[in-house]
Image (spheres, rainbow, N blue to C red):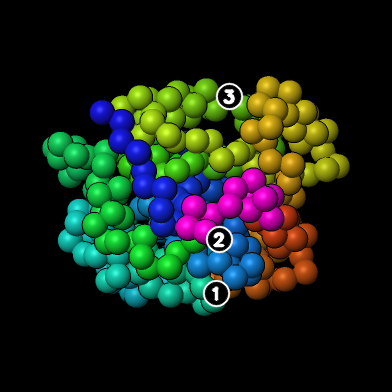
């Protein structure tokens, strides 16, 4: 039966798209950092075995003692798993490659789709003062992504401004519909954000027009430009907002955060 995700506590957003390399991790890190800049407290849950969000936020593999894997399997509390990052008010539950086997181990569990939700609830994450939880999903519509969608109030979809960008969306929408029917009736689509946008490229313009024609208000007004500073920032273990605070990429993620905040008052408020 579908159950409702509690309306008290932080707003939980799954950042998902089954395509790899479309800007999920980049958006998780930088939207998170931009929300923090406005004074909010944000928790990033790295749900991708590749652990790119963990690396990008400066948490090296050897420092990932308690991970999303342990958290999902109920072996550690959020309090034990959460680590601070170099960005003020931005915390993280890191991931390691362990998580790639979680998918298999979870299969035999009756509550396999609810594990993350159960873990978040049991941890009383609601009382820990977070305004937002951003879940960085793996590039697949697997059980991990389903767990994110079952736990979340909404799904935010980064869409790379390139040919065939819209093609995978129907499968993603279908998964969202299935999750609504089976587990999380109130799951919303937070919005679709165009990433790696190149204003000088006709293709980018066409993808944007196509997305707005078909998906209307679901598409954020803010587009994230392709910006070399954005791609450099993770190797300096920082969000672009601190790596190059005046870059176009930083400005775009600030605008995205402002647009998101305008659309919805945090559940905690
Ligand atoms: P995903 O998490 O969907 O696999 P990533 O966020 O890791 O995608 O992004 C894929 C690659 O594209 C990374 O190397 C990242 O640095 C780069 N990238 C993402 N967004 C931008 C951008 N706006 N400008 C330039 N490079 C970007
Ligand atoms: Mg990623």
Mark 2 nearby-residue class (10 Å; few <14, some 14–19, many ≥20): many
Q: Residue tagged by mark 2?
A: 32
Count up the numbered dots. Answer: 3
Q: Is residue 217 above or below residue 235?
A: above
Q: Is residue 49 above or below residue 34?
A: above
- Say which element carries label 3: loop
Viewer-nearest of discs 1 and 3? 1
Report if the CB atoms under discs 1 and 2 are less than 8 Å apart.
yes
Q: Say which mark, if any, is on residue 219.
A: none
Q: Which residues are magenta?
A: 258-269
Please identify the quadrant where the N terminus is shown: top left
Please state if 260 lies on the left or on the right of 78 as rendered: right
The image position of residue 109, as x and y in percent, is 15, 40
Q: Quadrant of residue 142?
A: top left
Q: Earlier in the sequence, mark 2 or mark 3?
A: 2
The answer to whether residue 137 shows anywhere in this view is: no
Q: Residue tagged by mark 3?
A: 167
Task: Name the one closer to the observer, 128 or 200.
Answer: 128
Residue at disc 3, CB closer than 8 Å to ligand 1: no
Mark 3 nearby-residue class (10 Å; few <14, some 14–19, many ≥20): few
Q: Earlier in the sequence, mark 1 or mark 2?
A: 2
Q: Residue tagged by mark 1?
A: 87
Task: Name the one closer to the observer, 196 or 75.
Answer: 75
- Spatial separation of the CA atoms under disc 1 and disc 3: 35 Å
The image position of residue 52, as x and y in percent, is 46, 58
- Say which element carries label 1: loop
Mark 1 nearby-residue class (10 Å; few <14, some 14–19, many ≥20): some
Q: Quadrant of residue 22?
A: top right
Q: Residue at x 66, y 72 (%)?
A: 243
The image position of residue 204, as x and y in percent, is 76, 36
- Say which element carries label 2: helix
What residue occupies the far right of the structure in this picture?
A: 200
């Amino acid at each position: 039966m579908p159950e409702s995700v509690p309306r008290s506590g932080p707003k939980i957003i799954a950042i998902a798209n089954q395509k790899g390399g479309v800007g999920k991790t980049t958006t998780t890190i930088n939207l998170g950092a931009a929300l923090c800049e406005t004074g909010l407290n944000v928790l990033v849950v790295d749900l991708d075995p590749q652990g790119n969000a963990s690396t990008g936020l400066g948490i090296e593999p050897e420092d990932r003692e308690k991970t999303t894997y342990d958290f999902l399997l109920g072996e550690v509390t959020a309090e034990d798993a959460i680590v601070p990052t170099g960005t003020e008010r931005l915390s993280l539950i890191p991931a390691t490659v362990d998580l790639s086997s979680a998918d298999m181990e979870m299969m035999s569990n009756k509550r396999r789709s609810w594990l993350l939700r159960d873990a978040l609830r049991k941890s009383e994450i609601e009382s820990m003062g977070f305004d937002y939880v951003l879940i960085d999903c793996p590039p697949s519509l697997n059980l991990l992504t389903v767990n994110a969608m079952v736990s979340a109030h909404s799904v935010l979809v980064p869409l790379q401004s390139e040919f065939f960008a819209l093609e995978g969306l129907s499968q993603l929408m279908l998964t969202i519909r299935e999750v609504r029917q089976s587990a999380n009736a109130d799951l919303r689509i937070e919005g679709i954000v165009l990433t790696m946008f190149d204003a000088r490229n006709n293709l980018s313009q066409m993808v944007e027009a196509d997305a707005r024609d078909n998906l209307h208000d679901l598409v954020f007004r803010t587009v994230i430009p392709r910006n070399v500073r954005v791609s450099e920032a993770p190797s300096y273990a920082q969000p672009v907002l601190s790596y190059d605070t005046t870059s176009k990429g930083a400005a775009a993620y600030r605008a995205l955060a402002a647009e998101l905040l305008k659309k919805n008052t945090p559940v905690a408020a």
